[in-house]
Image: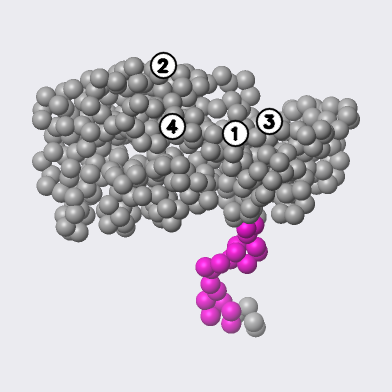
Amino acid sequence: MHHFHYQGDELCCENIPLRKIAGQVGTPCYVYSCATLKHHFAVFDGAFHGMPHLICYSVKANGNIAILGLFAALGGGADIVSGGELFRARRAGISADRIVYSGVGKTQAEIDYALRENILMFNIESTQELEAISRRAAVLGLKARIALRVNPDVDPKTHPYISTGLKKNKFGIDIEQAIQAYEHARDLKSIEVVGIDCHIGSQLTEISPFIEALERLKLLASRLEQMGIRIQYVDLGGGLGIPYREEEPPHPREYAKAIIERLKDLPFKLILEPGRVIVGNAGLLLTEVLYIKKTPSKEFIIVDAGMNDLVRPSLYGSYHEIEPVLKNQREPRVVDVVGPICESSDFIARDRSLPMMQQGEILAVMSAGAYGFSMASNYNSRNRAAEVLVDGDRFHVIRKRESWEDLIRGETMPEFIKGAAGQ
C-alpha cells in the first residue's frame, strides 16, 4: 500500500499534487509519503506482535534523518554499516541500545565511536574484526556486546549483486567455522557474546530462503547452548522484497508467521533489519523532460535526472515504473528514458511504452524510496537532488538541493597553483 494516486488526471502524493512540488522545489526531487512510511512500519512491526522483537531499520536504504526520526518515534531502532550511519541514527534520536552495527570493514575510529555510544551489539564479520573490537574495548575500558554474522550458504534467489549469504560472498563467517569463532569470542575478556546474526540478501521474493537460514541458525544456537554460550538475540537481517514490476513477494504477516512458528518456544529476542520493504514504495523521483530526441532506430526522452540520482537501473538493470505526473491521451511510444550523464549506461528505462511527452512535462519514477538518494553521487559535478516529505496536505523539504558551492566545499587550491594560475 502507498499513498501515490491520481486525482483526476493529476498524480498526487497523499493530498498534494506532485506538479505543485516540482514547481516549488524543482527537479530532480525525491518525494516520500509520511502516511506510507508509518503504515509500512506499523504493518511490519505488528506482524511480529506477541513475540519479543526489535525492528532495526536498515539505514543504508534511506538515511535521511527525518525518516530515521519518524521510525524512532514509532519505536524503531537502526541497523548501521558505518560511523556516518551511527551519527545519523543518533542525531535522529534513535537510542543507542536499539542500534546494531553490521558491515565487513569497520575502522578503528568507527569501532571506538560505537563502543563509546554503547550500542546494542556489533555484528562481527571476521575473526580479525573480532580481535580488533576486543582490543579497542580493552583500551577504552569497555565491554563490547557482539553477535557473529554467520554465512549459512543459502541461495536467496535474487540478483547476484545483492546476494550475501552464499559461501562465495564476502559477508559473514562460514557456518562450519562459527563454533571455533564463538569459542574464541567467549574467551576474550572485553567481549560479551549475546547473539547470532545472518543476512542472506536483498529483494527476496520467497520465504523459503529465510526459513532455511533460520533452521541453520537454530542448530548453531543449540550447539552453542551446550557449550555454555547463551544466545539472547537472533538477528535474521532484512531482505524482504517489494513489487517493482511483476514480483509477488510475501506479505510481512506471512513472513512473520513462518518465522514465529519456528521460534515461538525458544528464549530469543528476534532482531529484524527491514529497509526496502518499508521505504521502497514510499518514495518516488520527480524528473522534468528536457528534450525529445529521435534517431533512425530509437526515440529518447531526455530528462534532468541521471544515474547520479538513481543508479539502480544502470547498476542492476532494475525496473522502475514511470508515470506522467499529468495524464495525457497522446499516442504511446516505445522510448528510452535517459539522463544527462556522459555515460551510455545512464538510463532510467529502456524500450518502455510511454505516452508521447513534451518538453517541460514531469515524470514520476516510482518505487524509488530505497537505494535512491542513499546511492546518489556528484558524478559529472551534478548537485544532488532535493528530498521532500509529504504529510497529508503539507510538504516539507527535508534536504535542500545542493548548490554549486556545495560541490567544492572542503576542496582547497594550494598557493603555488594560485600563483601559477595568476601569471
Rounded to the nearest angstrom, the CA distance separating label 3 from label 4 is 27 Å
Check disc 1 and give the amino acid type. Answer: Asn
Q: Any mark on residue 281, and which?
A: 1
SS for dot 1:
helix
Rounded to the nearest angstrom, the CA distance separating label 1 from label 4 is 17 Å
The answer to which quarter of the image holds residue 78 is top left
SS for dot 4:
helix
| Residue receiving disc 3 | 321
Q: Position of residue 387 (x, y in %)?
A: 62, 50
**Nearest-to-viewer mark from 4 and 2:** 4
| Residue receiving disc 4 | 45
Colouring style: one colour
Of callouts 3 and 4, the N-terminal one: 4
* Residues tagged 3 and 4 counted as in contact (Cβ below 8 A): no
**Nearest-to-viewer mark from 2 and 1:** 1
Rounded to the nearest angstrom, the CA distance separating label 2 from label 1 is 23 Å
Check disc 3 and give the amino acid type. Answer: Glu
* CA neighbours of label 4 inside 10 A, class few (<14), some (14 to 19), many (20+): many
Of callouts 1 and 4, the N-terminal one: 4
Check disc 2 and give the amino acid type. Answer: Ser
Of callouts 4 and 2, the N-terminal one: 4
Q: Residue at x 63, y 54 (%)?
A: 397
Q: Quadrant of the C terminus?
A: bottom right
- The segment highlighted magenta reads 400-419
Question: From where the camera sits, is residue 128 visible?
Answer: no
Check disc 4 and give the amino acid type. Answer: Asp
Q: Is residue 410 magenta?
A: yes
